[in-house]
Amino acid sequence: MRFPNGPLRRTESIAPHSARNAGHLRDLRGCTDLARTESLFLTMTNDELAERLVRATDDWICTAEPEDLLKVLTGGGLDASIVQLGDEISVFIELSDRRGLLSSVGILGGDLPADEALALYAQAWGASEPPADDEAQRVWLAGDAIAQEAARRHLQEDVEENVDLFVAVAEEWLRQRPGAT
């Protein structure tokens, strides 16, 4: 990932977030043991805040339930929440129905219908074929470790390709926060 003012530096250890995730997270690059919030000081730059947003997104990807991964893959919905409490800023990545700068990150297939895109990606990933029914797709992704790992990797790659969106979120928040100059 490249930020306008320098490279993204990752110093956190790579470890599974919980025992429940231990099997599939060990092999994913970039998955960290971060909490979903990170406290930051108010003197941060756009790049520092964007870097925290990217890390929080990586953590969300590593710990997301399969049904949440599927929602992002087929319809998007990632959203950033940045909260200032006193001298600290907390960063959250969550699912939202609100359309924002990050809501299209991770969507499969561009102009293709979601079911068709999911089937094409599953085939490319070497995963089993997903069913057409939405509920059955959730069960499929939860039960197919290959598809789940590939979906997480796809989301991480899409985040890396769209760092400029995270920079834009950071710039917008820093510009609009109380006390901004």
Image (tube, rainbow, N blue to C red):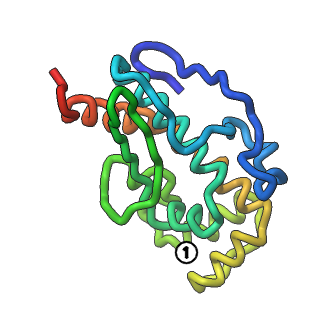
Q: Where does the image place residue 45, in percent across and percent down from the top left?
A: 35, 19
Q: Where does the image place residue 117, in percent across and percent down from the top left?
A: 55, 66
Which residue is more in the foreground, 20 or 138? 20
Which residue is more in the foreground, 127 or 40? 40
Q: Amino acid at mark 1?
A: Asp
Q: How many badges with numbers are in the image?
A: 1
In the figure, 38 relative to 130: above or below?
above
Q: Quadrant of residue 124?
A: bottom right
The residue shown at (79%, 62%) is: 145
The residue shown at (43%, 23%) is: 48
The residue shown at (21%, 30%) is: 175
Q: Where does the image place residue 168, in percent across and percent down from the top left?
A: 31, 34
Say few, some or many: other residues with alpha carbon within 10 Å of mark 1 (under 14 / 14 to 19 / 20 or more).
Answer: some
Give the residue furthest to the top. Answer: 6
Q: Quadrant of residue 68?
A: bottom right
Horizontal side of residue 147 vs 104, given as left or right? right
The residue shown at (73%, 54%) is: 149
Residue to which mark 1 is pinned: 115
In the figure, 3 relative to 90: above or below?
above
Q: SS at mark 1?
A: helix
